[in-house]
Image (cartoon, rainbow, N blue to C red):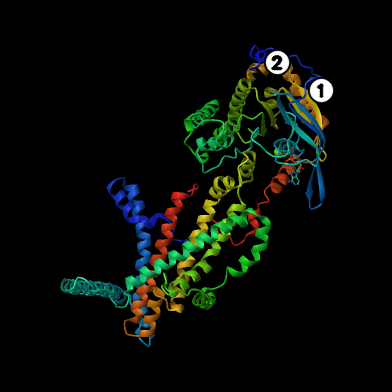
Amino acid sequence: MNSERIRGMTPARTTAHTEVIPMTKSHLELTGIEMAFDTPKGPFVALDNVNLKIRKGEFVSLIGHSGCGKSTVLNIVAGLLQANKGGCVLDGREVNSPGPERAVVFQNHALMPWLTVYENVELAVQQVFRKTMSRQRRKDWIHHNLELVNMAHAANKRPGEISGGMAQRVGIARALAMKPSVLLMDEPFGALDALTRAHLQDSLMDIQQELNNTVIMITHDVDEAVLLSDRIIMMTNGPAATVGEDLHIDLPRPRNRVTLADHPGYVHYRQEVLKFLYEKQRKLENLSQRRTASATTNQQARASDEPGAARA
Amino acid sequence: MTILDTTNVALPAGWLRTLSGRGSAALARAGRQLLLPLTGILLFVGFWQLAAPQVNTSLGSFPGPAQVFDQAGQLWQEHVNQRARADQFLAMQEARNARLLDANPDAEVKLRSYPGAPTFPDQVATSLGTVLAGFVLATVIAVPMGIVFGLNRHFQAAVNPLIQVFKPVSPLAWLPLVTMVVSATYVSDDPLFEKAFLTSMITVTLCSLWPTLINTSVGVAAVNPDLLNVSRVLRLSFASHVRKVVLPSSVPMIFTGLRVSLGIAWMVLIAAEMLAQSPGLGKFVWDEFQNGSSQSLSRIMVAVLTIGLIGFLLDRLMLLIQKQVAWNE
Ligand SMILES: Nc1ncnc2c1ncn2[C@@H]1O[C@H](COP(=O)(O)OP(=O)(O)OP(=O)(O)O)[C@@H](O)[C@H]1O
Ligand SMILES: [Mg+2]
């Protein structure tokens, strides 16, 4: 565990937007990522020359306007998407397929609706630790992770029987239970109300302090980004989006949202991000239009081309 | 799905429970639930009673509810009598065999089954057996095929036109082909199944597998992409992926397909039996039609009501199983 953090001291770190600790090889490194999607109107270049180095245990937020390519970056790190150019290296090994060492927390929990909370975590634990953990240890490990997110009491409930915030916790527990070296989160709290969201942010901070996971989190929420992150990566608008600014957040940990609100550093960082988003990268096109447009492309359900199917 | 799909069908138990237990509001609700279907049925019976005598056929006027009810009793009585005779026949043989064995312990004795014609309940049982066999065969074929098609877009694109073309084919069109193929290929000295049974069963399978096939492939293709990504992140093997993600996720769709399939199977079976002269309810109807006695119409009407009732019960049974198995119920 990071002793500096426990004492609430600021780790010595450069605030400049330059390389961090050049002498050690970085834990996770994205170099020259270019991503183009095939569309009916020809290739759409979503990302162009994205470079990013992340140290072990770092909490990194990706922020940027809707549709700029944050999810694309995350999915490339997860291995769910393949970059056209450039690559992603984790602990010296090239990433080219998904794997449990890069666990993903999805925006809408993505729990199997037919499994109980316990079974959902079990599915992951079974798959990852089948060979290395005894049955009893796996069981304890599942319970441990459910307790970590305060969901042990609902172990036997189905996702349909618990609230969205609770389901999201289980999603986090499932990801943590894989003992990932990187935890990838795509707007994990986006679908939650403000109170639940604050609650889960606090839990996440505690858990990250304890486990010291490397985290990459996408968010639209400036406060959330500043509160949780060691670094905020701000992305320019697409197409051909790239890293615009890289802001290091040197605020003492553990952080408390109430006391932090008046902290001059906090206010400053917040302003930096807001400036980037609303001055430097001001979205000219109507944001809400963009949202609905991207929502419809996501819903290209293959099922719809089957007119003969009977539905319950 | 159907109009009758409400709770009012499971009435007797619920009705009694409400009577004994809860307050007057529940009682009123239960009363309404019982009242409306009952009113519907009574109105129908009344209309039938009034309209039936107006329809004159060469076999007399169309049977009213009373005559049909009467014939139902008659058919049951015939069945009971037949059973008694069969028992008697068997007892006689056994007595004779015992006597033969007494006289000569090495005597060869035989037991022959009663040669009487199948009664109405026998025909019902045969039909049920055939429809279940055909339906099970259809399920065993359609679900795995549906999974394969659903998992592979290219495969699906390749077979989709075939499915669309074969789906609407009527059983009557398949039947001659099936009959010929079965007679040509199923040659055995000691047949396990009767040819007629096989013919109607295969016809049922051919006609009823499509809804299950289509629904399975649609259900499999429509698995939530997030869940597919979870499966990829976990690096599930292909077998686990199908077993733990794809199949459970499509169970609700598969069951909807199965219910439609079973309904079609039952409808097709009656037609197939009629045309193929294979034992069962269809043959019963056809025989009565050919028979042309004054009671034939009433007896056919009994068969019609029985067919409807059994179809309804089969659907209820599927629904019950679905509720046990599907996670979204
Ligand atoms: N499969 C795809 N095919 C074509 N275009 C795509 C595809 N996936 C993403 N895009 C496009 O790439 C761009 C970046 O998408 P991405 O989902 O990464 O954005 P995002 O920053 O995560 O947006 P949001 O904040 O709304 O989630 C968008 O313009 C989107 O329309
Ligand atoms: Mg996104």
**Residue B94 image position (x, y, % from top left):** 21, 71
- Kindly indicate whether the residues beneath marks 1 and 2 are on one polypeptide chain: yes
Instruction: Kindly indicate whether the residue at mark 2 contacts the one at mark 1 (C-beta within 8 angstroms).
Output: no
Establish if A243 lies above or below B22.
Answer: above
Instruction: Name the chain letter of the residue that bears numbered label 2.
Output: A
Question: Which image quadrant: the N terminus of chain A?
Answer: top right
| In-front residue for pair B201/A35 | B201
Structural crowding at the residue carrying mark 2, measured as other residues with C-alpha within 10 Å and reported as few (<14), some (14–19) or many (≥20): few
Reading the image, the residue beneath label 2 is A263
Left or right of residue A144: residue A64: right
Give the alpha-carbon distance from disc 1 to disc 2, as whole Å.
27 Å
Q: Residue at x 33, y 73 (%)?
A: B120
Question: Picture quarter containing residue A99?
Answer: top right
Reading the image, the residue beneath label 1 is A19
Question: Picture quarter containing residue B23?
Answer: top left
Left or right of residue A82: residue A121: left
Q: Which residue is drawn at 62% across and 57% down?
A: B149
